[in-house]
Image (cartoon, rainbow, N blue to C red):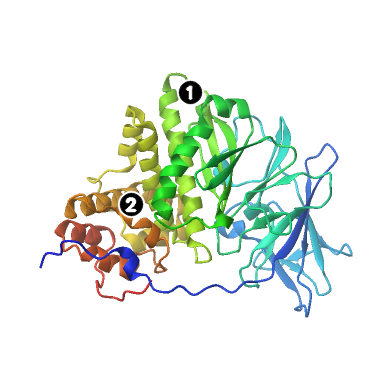
Amino acid sequence: MKILRPIRLAQFLCCLAATAAHAESEYTVRQSPGAAPDLEITLALPPGDAPASHRLSARGVAWRLQEQVRAPRCDDGTRLTKDGGGSWIAPPGCHHVTWTVSPPAIEDGTVDVSAQTSLFLTQPKWALLSEPTSLLRETDSAPQQAVLRAADAATTLFGATPAAQGGWLIPADNNAPEFYVVGPAPVQSEQVGDFRVHHVADNPQRVKQLGLVASHAQALRFLARIVYADNPVPEADRSLMIVWIGIDTRLGHAGGAAGSRSFLANYPIGGGDHAQDHAAVTFMILAHEQFHQLADARRGDMPGLPGWINESIAQYYGLRAMQEALGDDAAAALTRRFIDPGRPVEQRFAGAEALFATDRPRALDLAYRQGATFWAELDRALRTASGGAASLDDDISDLLRMTFPEDGSLPPAFLSYLRQWNDNRIDQIISNYVGETDAAAGSGG
């Protein structure tokens, strides 16, 4: 039987349980007044009946990032030691833990920000503080938000989301990371639709000349329509921050890193005759990271998306945003590098997701190429099956509020929705990329 118009994906969503609120942890940061660009960070451990000890770690270590915590110690000067699993152990009676972060001073154009490293910029003098590499968290406590504040009046601190009682919010363990600026960095703020966007750059003049602020605004408007659709943007999610760090095009690569409400983006320095190509790559990266940021906000307190889903869908919509904004030959050529329906399927969803634990570079390459191709093909098939009345764009906002299987597959409710179209092309795409699944395996979100 031909179904003329399947019911909307939103009708598959069931009630989502609210996550209980937890008390916020307290962090302070102090910038060294001397020549060395050291940051001194203190965590106030929770009061009450303390356990035998506290286990602390920088959560980026689990993501294979380089920890930047140096010499953590308790109030009385007792140095913390590491256990066999790599966690720092705070002994009983330790109420505050203080450590030093020494961000390396970087040379202009040399840093790929995808490393998510705390950095010190010498002109002007300010530090990028990377939460996943530089803030210790209690590993045995429930996921909770925290607050980062300046320790004294001499320390200038800026972040993406202000806390109600001052300072800046640190996301819970189950949300994307965050980045902060310590020191007198120039901040340019823009209103883009519902969002207040704060831009911090290593060289504001170069960023202005490249038109990056205007380009980002265009990407944000497009992606916000996809991610939020008709849903209001919560007030707490309307403040965003972007940190721009230039990278010399002669290095042959550039990167980005999405945070909960902030993200890092490289932009090209130089390029000559290939400036248009570098502009396309820059736009793709910033749109990819912007999608991550919006998707994280849309999910709220829900667990993060599986790596395969998270990276592949961000890449597809990063390419879409780039095409909408640039619409030139460089954008078309870059899109073809990633989206190729003729490329053989190397790994189905579960296999690709498993690679994130064993071979992350290959997993990311699969997500950027094979994954983006999957979403492009699915979008095309939905438009064809509906005669242009429906597309993947209509479904993303609701899909981002669904619970995903841990193996990186698609939610059963979404698969059931897709199969309502009774379209052989859609069924073949699911079979090729996802595998044989039970179309009737539940309809809960």
- Element on which disc 1 rests: loop
290 lies above or below 266: below
Residue at horizontal 84 percent and vertical 73 percent from the top: 93
The residue beneath circle 1 is 271
Q: Is residue 67 visible?
A: no
Residue at horizontal 66 percent and vertical 31 percent from the top: 107
The residue under label 2 is which amino acid type? Answer: Asp
Q: Residue furthest right?
A: 76
**Total count of labels:** 2
Question: Horizontal and vertical percent for residue 79?
Answer: 82, 62
279 lies above or below 91: above
Quadrant position of residue 442: bottom left
The residue beneath circle 2 is 393
Q: Nearer the viewer, residue 33 or 389?
A: 389
Question: Horizontal and vertical percent for residue 303?
Answer: 50, 66
Mark linked to residue 353: none
**Which quarter shows the N terminus?**
bottom left
Quadrant position of residue 11: bottom left
Q: Is label 2 or label 1 in front? A: 2
